[in-house]
Amino acid sequence: MTYQLDLLDIQGNVLRAYGRFRYPAARYVFFNIRDGAKGRAFVAALTRRVTTAVQWGEGPDKLPPPEWTLNVAFNYQGLKELDLPRESLIGFSPEFVAGMKDRKDILGDDGPSAPEHWDPIWQHNRETREHDVHIFVSINGLMPLPKDAKPAAVQAAVNDAKARVEAGYRWLLEQVAAQQGGVALLGGHRGDNGELLDYQDVQAVLENGVPTSKEHFGYTDGIGDPVFEGVPYDAERINGRGKQLANGQWAPLAAGEFLLGHTDEALEYPPAPSPLLLARNGTYMIYRKLHENVGTFERYLDEHGQRYPGGKELLAAKFVGRWRDNGAPIVKAWDDASKARFDADYKAADGHGKDQLLSNFTYDEDMSGGRCPFSAHIRRINPRASLEFTRDEQDPAKVCGAFSVSEGAFDTPGALANRRRVLRRGLPYGTVKDRSRDDGNHGIIIMMLNADINRQFEFVQQQWINYGNDFKAGNDKEILLGNHSQSEHFPSKAVLQVDPASDDAPYILPRLPRFVETRGGEYFFVPSLTALRMIAAGTVDPT
Amino acid sequence: MSNIAGKAYAMNVITPIRWYTAWLNKLIFWVALQRPATLKGLITLSLIHYARWVIIGRDQFPHVHPSQPRETLKYSYMLFFSNFNGSWDQYVDSFTFAIPSGLDMFWKWNVRYSKSVSLTPFHKYIRYNQLDTLHYYNAYPLATSNDVKSARIVKAKLLDFDSATRDASDDDFAKQYRTLLRDLQHDLGDMYPTPIVSMSAYQVERRQRWHEGQLDGSKH
Ligand code: HEM
C-alpha cells in the first residue's frame, strides 16, 4: 500500500474495530450541551485524551495501546450548539441534518421498530432542546493478556477490561463536573431489568467467562469489514474485504468511501462541509441499537430446522451466509462434506490462513444462490461481484432457476457494490438469560461508518435489506434484519434457492417474523483531531 | 408534476449536439443495435422498463400550426427517454458505476458533456438538462421490470406444468412440481408497494392522500 493516511489525525474507532484489538468491553455515553462556551471547553478536554489511529506496538512511530480508548462524535444539533458557523453547517448532508428518527420511513423503522418503542434517550432526542443528544463518547477497555488460558485467568482479564472502562468513565464524569452544568449527561438507556441507565454498556458475548466473537443468535461475527487504502494494519486483509477486480484479484477500496477529504471510487471528493480542515479525515457514523428477539429466532429455527432437508444448523447458516460455529462461509461449505473439509483446513491453518479461509471468497461459483441464498444477510449487505448476473429470459422454456455471470457487462465486476460498503463497529449488549424469550435486554449496538450516509448505509438498509429488486427478488427482504410484514394476509417470506442442476425444490421460509427490532439511534459526525481542536477553540471558519 | 408513478421513474433528458456531428451519434446507435454486446451492461442492470435515444435534427422540431413562430435552432438535440425502477440517484449512479464507458460513448459529442466519472459534474449535467414529467401513468404500479419479466415466465411455466402433469402419476407429479419450483426459484418475489423513493416524494404523496381524505388530520 503506497497511500498514506495521517494516522495521528484520524480517530482510532474509524480505522479500528476495537473488539479485534483485545478491547472486549465498552461504554457509550451521550451529552446535552447547555452552554456553547462550556461545551467547547468540554470538547477541548476530551480532545486531549482522544485515541487516534496511530499504530500500536514497539518501535518508531508506534505507541502502546491505551488502557482505555476515548472517541468523540457529534450529531447535527450538537455542532449547532457548539456554534459552528451556518455556512459550515449547511455543508453537512441532508440526512445528517435530519437525523435518524426523521429518516424512519427510509430505514423501515416501523411497527415494533418505530421510534415510539425506542429507548427513552432516543425517543426524546430531537423533541426538546433539553433532551437533545449532542455529543457521543465511547470508551473501550483493554484486556490485559491473561496469565494462562484457563477460564479463571481469562475471566479476570475481562474484568480488568471492564474496570478500565469504569476508570475511563470516572475520568469522563470529572470532565463533565469541571464544566459546572455546561454539559449534562443524558440517561435513558434501557438496562437488564427495564431500569434506565446513564450509559449504554456493550461487551463481547462470554462463553464460560471467555470472550467470543459471537452475537446473541449464536453466529460468529466480526469477520467481514471493508479494507481501504492506507490502513497499515489491514495490509494482509485485502483479499475478500477490498474490492473484487476482473482478473480475480482484490484491491483496497478508495479511502474516500470512508473518509471525507479523500478521493472516492468515483474519483472525486465526497460531498463535505467546508472548510476542508473541518471535513478532512472525518466521517459519518450511524449509531443503532438493535434488539434481538432470541425466543422468536429459536422457535422459528427449531420449527423449520426439523423440516429443512439440510437440518437446523445448515438452515441457520442460510439465514446469514455463514455457519454459526466457526463462521465458515456457506459458499465454501455448502453441505456436510464440504463443511468437514473446511473445518479440517481451518483447524490446520495459522492465524492468517484462518482469516483468509473465512473472508476470502466470492459468489462467482454460486450465481444461482444454491449455496448462499439471495436473501442471506451477508449476500444482501455485501454482494461483492454477484450483481453482475444475468440469464436468458426471452424464452421461458430456457429458464431453469439459474443465473450466470454476465461477463464484462460492467466496467468492473463489483461496480454495484463498491460504493455501498460500510465499516462496521460496535459490540453486543446485554445477556440472554432465557433463550425462549424475546423480552430480555439483548442485542447489538452497531455503528457503521461511511462517507455518505444516504448512498451507503441508507441505500443498503432500504434497497437491499427491506426490498429485493436488485436481487430479482421483488419485495422479499433480507431474512435476519428485514422489517417483515406483520400482516395476517400478506406475510413476508424468503426463498432459499437450490442448485439448478439438482432434483431439489427451493425451500420457502414462510411467515417470517421480525428477528431484529430497532431500539434507537442517531447519525453522528466523527471529526478528525484537527477538526476537534478547531471546534473546541471555536475557530471553524469557512471563509 | 411527478416523475414517479408506482415503482417507475420517468426521465427525459434533452441535450444539445452540433448538427454536423449528429450523424456520428446516429452511427453509434446503429452499431449498438447491430451488436447487442454493447448493450449488455444496460441489460444486466435490469432496472429499466424501456429506454430510447433519439436524435432530433434542428429542423425536425414539430411545427404544429402556422401561428407557431418559426425558430432557428443553433443545435440539433439528443433526447434520452427512460422509464426505470428506483430513485434518480440509484439509476444515475448505477450507470456511472457500472457502464461509464458506454455512457461516454453515447453522449460523447454532446455539447459540454462532462463525462460520467466523476459523479457530481455528471449529476449536474443530467439534472440541468432534464425535463420534469407533467403527467405519468402506470398501469401496474407494484411491478418493476424484473417483476414483469418474472410474471411472464411464471405464467408460461405454469401453463406448461398444467398440461404436462394432467395424467401424471403421483411420483411423477411430485418430481415435476419440484422442477417447476426450482425453475421459478428466482421469479417468486413478493409484489408490494415501492419503498419510498425520497422523503420529499413521500411527503408529497401523503399530502395528496390527505387532500383526498384518505389520511386523518394528524400528520400531513
Ligand atoms: C442484530 C443485528 C445484526 C446481526 C445479528 C448481524 C450479524 C452478522 C453476522 C453473523 C455476520 C457474519 C460475520 C461477518 O462476516 O463478519 C454479519 C456480517 C455483516 N453485517 Fe451484520 N448483523 C446485524 C446487523 C447489521 C446491520 C444493521 C448492518 C448494516 C446495515 C450489518 C452489516 C454487516 C456487514 C457489512 C457484514 C459483512 C458482510 C461482508 O462483508 O461479507 N449488519 N452480520
Image (cartoon, coloured by chain):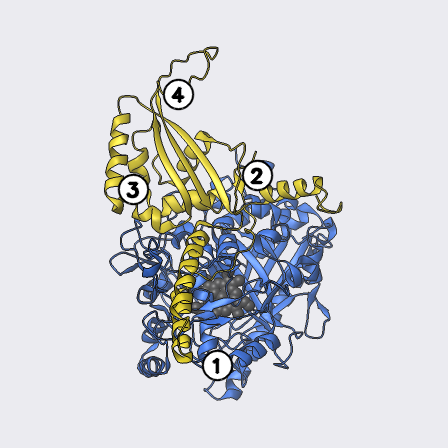
Chain colours: A blue, B yellow
Residue drawn at (43%, 64%), measured in percent from left and top?
A374
Against A480, residue A417 (above or below) is above
Residue A186 shows up from this direction: no
Percent x, y for residue A539? 56, 41
Element at label 4 = loop
Front of the two marks 2 and 4: 4
Residue type for callout 4: Phe
Q: Nearer the viewer, residue A130 or A309?
A: A309
Question: Quadrant of the image for the N terminus of chain A?
Answer: bottom left
Element at label 2 = loop
Sequence-first disc among 1 and 2? 2
Q: Nearer the viewer, residue B125 or B91?
A: B91
Residue type for callout 3: Ser
Q: Tell if the residue under mark 2 belongs to the same chain as the one under mark 3.
A: no
Residue drawn at (44%, 65%), measured in percent from left and top?
A378
Query: Is disc 2 in contact with disc 3, using a CB cutoff of under 8 Å?
Result: no
Sequence-first disc among 4 and 3? 4
Inter-mark Cα distance, 1 to 3 = 47 Å
Inter-mark Cα distance, 2 to 3 = 34 Å
Q: Nearer the viewer, residue A277 or A228?
A: A228
Inter-mark Cα distance, 4 to 3 = 30 Å
Residue type for callout 1: Lys
Against B57, residue B47 (above or below) is below
Q: Which residue is mark 4?
A: B61
Q: Which residue is mark 3?
A: B101
Q: Tell if the residue under mark 4 belongs to the same chain as the one under mark 3.
A: yes
Element at label 3 = helix
Q: Tell if the residue under mark 2 belongs to the same chain as the one under mark 4.
A: no
Inter-mark Cα distance, 1 to 4 = 66 Å
